[in-house]
């Protein structure tokens, strides 16, 4: 899908900063064009440090042609510079459900438009994001997507509350390819271990209370616990929007600590717009997550990674036909024989496992947007699912969409492996002296049996 016309320099004033991730910057439309109302524009970024690996795929290497060549739409999309859209529609929607994935439409953009936008949004971007990346002004297209923090193209209608949740990995790996010294991975979530490394590196000022196993548990009570923990440490995992405007959480995913005043202001905005107090809002959100089943689909997709990076890395070397850099350091004979077996896999089998691994990596890194609006009393027919909130005797329509569904570059496999080893080694060496978040939930092991 492509839209007619090109966004020119004169259009730049109508687009304002909404947020950003590692690979894209999101702009919100403030003008009056009917075709753009209620939309956001997803603009590609480039890293300033050329030695860093790109967070998402822009072009296909010859090995990626091997990996994805069986999906002609993907290969064609690379030539047309709309890979993100094609991957969301032709790969991720098959796993997450087409009704929860919005591929958007491609819109042509001029270099002048991108340069002006870059200048206009500079002061809104977190400084660490500005230092790391800039808008790719050589791109000739951007992706126009419905603003899922709103319900329709008309934000002036009924009030809409939306949350964006970056849920992260919701299961504990059980792969036989995990080495004995890394067996802690089978008991403690990757998220919790990574928090400790980030704290040590000064990236966050306190470790999060959030436990992904609670959110993915399928238990209403534990989902509530997860959402409560977001309110004390949102980091880049949780944001709240009222009528499309951010009222809680970090703009560029950098707010790791929330001041009490910010939380109070958010609750005031929520209450003013919806009449909901915090317990009502948590109940509403938990119920929608519980009912919709979307996290079940996300978890199933994440679990496509059944070899763990410690197994998958060997198949990566099979694909690129290089000597395995991991095997040369292995001294455990039993483990080495397992890895040797992996190296005997056919190319087709290796490709399938790596494809699944990369799809899983996207699922572990994407965000879920859930939007709510009160349903008019007396209305029974609606295209949307609904939740009745007993405490305020009100029915709410809701919709759930996954965003940030980019294809991960194959060349990131070595990076994934090194980061995994770094996170686990740090946690194993230092867990006795870890800072513990107040009231943290340490039941990371409680789901091992339940989830597999």
Image (cartoon, helix red, strand yellow):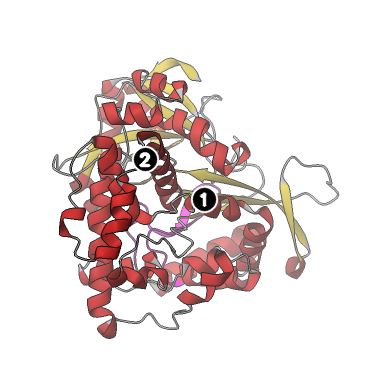
Rendered location of residue 92, percent (x, y): 50, 38
Q: Residue 197: x and y, percent?
A: 25, 68
Q: Is the magenta stretch mostly helix, strand or loop?
A: loop
Q: Whole-percent x and y of residue 270?
A: 57, 61
Disc 1, SS: strand
**Residue 59 picture location, percent across and down:** 29, 27
In this picture, is 193 found above or below 386? below
* Disc 2/disc 1 C-alpha distance (Å): 30 Å
Instruction: Identify which residue, 163 or 241, lies in the foreground.
Output: 163
Instruction: Find out whether residue 247 is within the magenta segment.
Output: yes
Q: Which mark is residue 368?
A: 1
Residue 103 visible in rendering: no
Residue at x 64% of width, y 59% of height: 274
Residue at x 40% of width, y 48% of height: 361
User: For this view, does 110 lie left or right of residue 393?
Assistant: left
Q: The magenta stretch spans which residues? A: 232-256
Q: How crowded is mark 2: few (under 14 residues within 10 Å), some or many (20 or more)?
A: many
Q: Name the residue under label 2.
A: 350
Pick whichever, 320 or 7, lies toward us.
320
């Amino acid at each position: 899908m492509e839209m007619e016309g090109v966004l020119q320099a004169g259009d730049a004033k109508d687009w304002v900063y909404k947020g950003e991730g590692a690979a894209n910057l999101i702009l919100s439309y403030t003008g009056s064009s009917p075709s753009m109302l209620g939309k956001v524009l997803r603009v590609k970024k480039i890293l300033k440090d050329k030695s860093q690996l790109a967070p998402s795929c822009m072009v296909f290497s010859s090995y990626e042609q091997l990996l994805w060549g069986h999906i002609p739409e993907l290969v064609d999309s690379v030539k047309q510079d709309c890979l993100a859209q094609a991957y969301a529609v032709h790969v991720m929607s098959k796993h997450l459900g087409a009704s929860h994935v919005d591929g958007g439409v491609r819109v042509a953009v001029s270099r002048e438009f991108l340069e002006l936008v870059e200048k206009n949004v500079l002061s809104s971007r977190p400084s660490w994001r500005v230092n790391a990346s800039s808008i790719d002004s050589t791109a000739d297209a951007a992706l126009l997507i419905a603003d899922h923090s709103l319900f329709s193209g008309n934000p002036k209608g009924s009030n809409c509350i939306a949350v964006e949740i970056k849920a992260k990995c919701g299961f504990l790996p059980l792969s036989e390819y995990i080495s004995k010294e890394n067996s802690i991975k089978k008991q403690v979530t990757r998220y919790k271990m990574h928090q400790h490394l980030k704290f040590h590196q000064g990236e966050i000022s306190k470790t999060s209370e959030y436990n992904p196993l609670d959110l993915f548990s399928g238990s209403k009570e534990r989902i509530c616990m997860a959402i409560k923990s977001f309110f004390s440490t949102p980091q880049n995992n949780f944001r709240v929007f009222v009528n499309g405007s951010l009222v809680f959480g970090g703009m560029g995913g950098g707010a790791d600590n929330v001041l009490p005043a910010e939380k109070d202001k958010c609750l005031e905005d929520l209450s003013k717009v919806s009449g909901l107090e915090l317990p009502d809002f948590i109940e509403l959100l938990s119920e929608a997550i519980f009912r919709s089943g979307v996290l079940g689909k996300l978890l199933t997709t994440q679990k496509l990674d059944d070899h763990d990076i410690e197994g998958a890395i060997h198949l990566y070397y099979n694909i690129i036909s290089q000597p395995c850099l991991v095997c040369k350091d292995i001294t455990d004979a039993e483990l080495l024989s397992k890895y040797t077996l992996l190296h005997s896999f056919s190319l087709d089998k290796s490709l399938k496992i790596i494809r699944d691994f990369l799809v899983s990596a996207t699922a572990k890194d994407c965000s879920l947007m859930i939007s709510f609006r009160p349903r008019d009393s007396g209305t029974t027919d609606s295209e949307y699912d609904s939740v009745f909130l007993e405490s305020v005797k009100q029915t709410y329509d809701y919709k759930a969409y996954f965003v940030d569904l980019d294809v991960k570059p194959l060349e990131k496999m070595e990076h994934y492996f090194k980061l995994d080893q770094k996170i686990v080694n740090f946690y194993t060496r230092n867990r006795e002296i870890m800072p513990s978040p107040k009231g943290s939930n340490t039941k990371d092991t409680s789901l091992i049996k339940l989830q597999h």
